[in-house]
Amino acid sequence: MIAAGSNQALDRLRPYILKTPLVESTVLGSKIGCRVRLKCEHRQITGSFKVRGALNKILNLPRQRLDEGVIVASTGNHGAAVAYACRLIGGKCTVVVPEDVSSTKAEAVEKLGAQIHRFGSDGSDAERFAREWAVSDNLEYISPYNDVDVIVGQSTLATEMLEEVDQDCTVYVAVGGGGLISGMSTVLKAAFPGIRIVGCSPENHPVMDASVKAGYIVDLPYRPTLSDGTAGGLEHDTITLPLCTAGVDSWVRVSEPEIRDALRLLAGQERMIVEGAAAVAVAAMQKHELPPTMSRVAILCGANIDRDRLKRILDDV
Amino acid sequence: MIAAGSNQALDRLRPYILKTPLVESTVLGSKIGCRVRLKCEHRQITGSFKVRGALNKILNLPRQRLDEGVIVASTGNHGAAVAYACRLIGGKCTVVVPEDVSSTKAEAVEKLGAQIHRFGSDGSDAERFAREWAVSDNLEYISPYNDVDVIVGQSTLATEMLEEVDQDCTVYVAVGGGGLISGMSTVLKAAFPGIRIVGCSPENHPVMDASVKAGYIVDLPYRPTLSDGTAGGLEHDTITLPLCTAGVDSWVRVSEPEIRDALRLLAGQERMIVEGAAAVAVAAMQKHELPPTMSRVAILCGANIDRDRLKRILDDV
C-alpha cells in the first residue's frame, strides 16, 4: 500500500516540492572505492525531507479538519514542515514547544504562520501535552513518523530516484523515528528486491536500531548528538518498528567525531552544508564494508544546522 | 565552429567530467520574482569549469607535444585544471608562479603531479616568463582563455544545459578572460537565437566589460576583489574580445558588498559553498532588471574559495 500510494502521492506533491538532484561524489567515491552518489534532499523546500510527509498528510485531511486545526510537537524540521504545508494548503497549525525553546526556533515557526504554545521542560512534556490537547479538543495530532500518510509522503523521495538506482545499489539513510527509511525501503524493494537499505544512527541515540534488535520499542537515556534531527524517544506503538524490521538490511552506528568529520568533508570538499543527520548517513557509508563493486547512495536528508555549530565545524575545514 | 565542435568535445570529455546539475533556487526565485536556476558547476571535478577547457586542449594536443611538456602561468583554477588534465591523459605540466606564491597553492598544484617554477613578483611577471620559456624551448603555452580549444571545452557547459533552457531564458556568467562566456554564448545562441547572455564582473575589475565598450583591450589598475577567479589583465590579441562583443547582450557590474551578500545567501540559504566569481553571477542576477516572466540561470562557476575568506563570510550567515 505504501509502494502503490507513493506514485500517486508524488503526483500530488510535485507542484509543491523540488525533485532534488542525485549527484556523483568523486571525493567519497575514491575514498571508498566504488561509485558514490548523494541525494541532495537538503536542498528541498524547508531544508528537509519532512515537507514531503507533512504535505502528504495535510493534502489527505478533509478541509474541515484543517480548519479546526492540526497540532504538532516539534521545533525542528517536522514542525516547520507542517507549518509550511498548512500555510500552503490552508489550515490552522499549532506547534507545542518546551517553555525554554530558543526564540530563533519559535520565531521561525511563527514566521510560517503557525501558533506557538509553550509547555513543559522538554520535548516529551510538549509531545504529551500536544497529544492530550488533540484528544480533548478532537483536533488532528500529526506524528512525525507514526502515520501512514506521513510515511507515504517520505517515500516519494525514493520514488523520484527509481530511474537512477538499481538492484546493485546500497542506500544509506539516517534513522530517528524511522518514517523516511520505512517509506523508502518499501518503495525501493518493491522495484528492486535485491537493493540493500542501511539504517544509520548516532551511537549516542540508536533508538530504532536498538528497538529492532530488541523486538520492541526501547527507551534510551538522552545523550547529546550532532544529529539532533534523529534524536528523541519513540512512540511505543509506532508502525515504523515492523516496517524497519522488515525493510532494513543492516544497521550502522557512528560516533560524534565520525559525524563531525563527515560534516567537514561535505563542506570542505563537496561544498555542501548539511545538518548532522545527513552527515550520519555519509559517516555510516564510509565505515560500512561492502564489496567494492556495489554502488552506494547516501541520503542528505536536511540542511538545518545551527549557525554556531556550523561555524565550529568549519573551523577545521 | 565552436558550436559545432562543442557536441563532439562533450562526447570526448564525458568520461572525465561530471554533468553538473541545474537546480531550482526557490530562495532567489521568490526574491527576484521569476524562475531561477543555478548551474552547479562548482561541483565539477577540480572545483571549477576550467577542467573542461583544459581537458579539451590536452586531448587535442599530439602525444609528442604532451611528452615535451605544456606550460601554464596560474596558481588558480586554470593551473590546477591543466595539471589535472595532464595527470589524467599523460603529459608533462609546468606551472609558473610568482616567487611569493603561498605554499598551500603551490603544494596543491604539485600534488596533481605538475612541476612548479617560481619567477617574478606577480602574475604578469610569471605569465611573461612562461610565454618566453614556451617560445624559446618550443613548448606548448596554454592560455586560460585565448585559445579555441579551451573555449570549445568551456562551451560544453552550455551544451549539457541545452535540453533544460529555452528562448526565454537569461543566463548570467562571471567574466574574467571571457573564455567561458564566449563558448557558452556561441552554443546557446546557435540553439536559441533569442536567449540573453549577461556578462557579470566585479566593479573592482571589469576588464572585459570595459574592453568591449572601448573596442580594444584596456588595462585596468589592480584593485582587490573577492572574485579572484576573474581577476588579472587580458592578452591584447585575445579572441574572446570579438566573441564577447558579438555574444554578450548586457553587462552588469557588482560591488564587493554585493558579492559578499551573494556568498552569504548561497551558504546560508542554498547551503552551497562557492567562490567569489560564482557569487558575482548571482549578485548580478539579483540587481539586473528584467520582465518577471523571464526565467534566469546563474552559472556557479567554481568552489575554490580561501578557507579564511569563507570563515569571515560565514561569520554573518
Image (spheres, coloured by chain):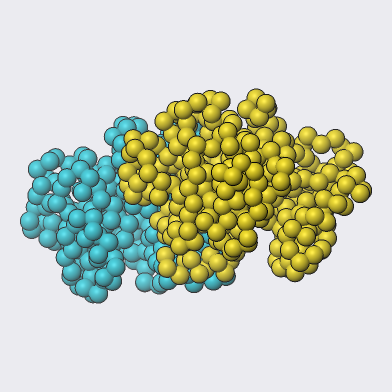
Chain colours: A cyan, B yellow
Residue B304 visible somewhere in the drawing:
no
Residue farthest to the front?
B214
Corner quadrant of residue A37: top right
User: x, y (%) of residue B162?
Assistant: 52, 30
Question: Residue at 21% across / 39% down in the picture?
Answer: A60
Is residue A1 toward the left or the right of residue B312 in the image?
A: left
Q: Depth check: A161 or A112 in front?
A: A112
Quarter placement of the C terminus of chain A: bottom right
User: x, y (%) of residue B199?
Assistant: 52, 44
Q: Depth check: B250 or B77 in front?
A: B250
Is residue B132 toward the left or the right of residue A251 in the image?
A: right
Question: Residue at 31% across / 36% down in the picture?
Answer: A15
Q: Depth check: B48 or A83 in front?
A: B48
Question: Residue at 54% across / 28% down in the picture?
Answer: B189
Question: Residue at 42% across / 36% down in the picture?
Answer: A160
Residue B88 visible somewhere in the drawing:
yes
Corner quadrant of residue B182: top right
